[in-house]
Image (cartoon, rainbow, N blue to C red):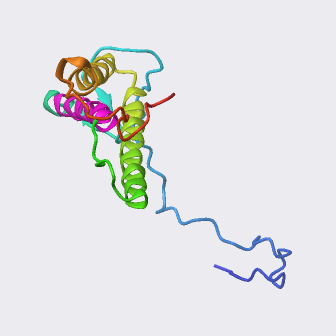
Amino acid sequence: MDHDMGGGGGGGGMGMNMAPPPSTMTMTMKPRHFVHMTFFWGTKSEILFDQWPGESRGMYALALLFVFVMSFLVEWLSHTRFIKPGSNKVSAGLVQTVLHLLRVGLAYLVMLALMSFNAGVFLIAVLGHALGFFFFGSRAFAKPHNDNAYDDLPPMSC
């Protein structure tokens, strides 16, 4: 193969003397699958990763559990106090930043899981957020605060 790109090969420097790829380098095509653009019911779906959970009902259940835990954790991070009053402002700011990073990252992963348009994933994500809010954000299990300070992180906005 001629690698002369300097114009001395008669191709004007455009790589015209390059040989075609050998016949052993054939492109293999993956079997194409249908991407849903509307909600559907079923266990044969791709959630977050290529070919995951696949066609196994057990892996689908694990994927639903994963989405539930992520959405539950988003609510936990949104309504839990990690920073003690009177903490160093710089260290408190760093803790808030890390908490924000985790919360936004998990929220984006839940959103990407919802983009599978699987109705089961949608229901599980909503259930995870609802139960997370019930346990950590509602008055049902609220611990009285001695001060009127808010949680460590401001409410999420879309």
Question: Does residue 20 sit above or below 7 in this rendering?
Answer: above
Residue 110: image quadrant is top left
Horizontal placement of 10 versus 154: left or right?
right
Residue under the point 43% across and 31% down: 155
Which of these two is toward me, 56 or 27? 56
Give the main secondary structure of the magenta stretch.
Answer: helix
74 in magenta: yes
Question: In the displayed image of the protein, which residue is found farthest to the front?
Answer: 146
Residue under the point 69% across and 72% down: 18
Horizontal placement of 119 versus 68: left or right?
right
55 in magenta: no
Horizontal placement of 39 versus 54: left or right?
right
Residue 21: image quadrant is bottom right
- Looking at the picture, how far across and down is residue 129, in whole percent? 30, 24
Magenta highlight range: 61-79
- Looking at the picture, how far across and down is residue 71, in whole percent? 30, 31
Residue under the point 80% across and 71% down: 14
Query: In which quadrant is the N terminus drawn?
Result: bottom right
Which of these two is toward me, 86 or 151? 86
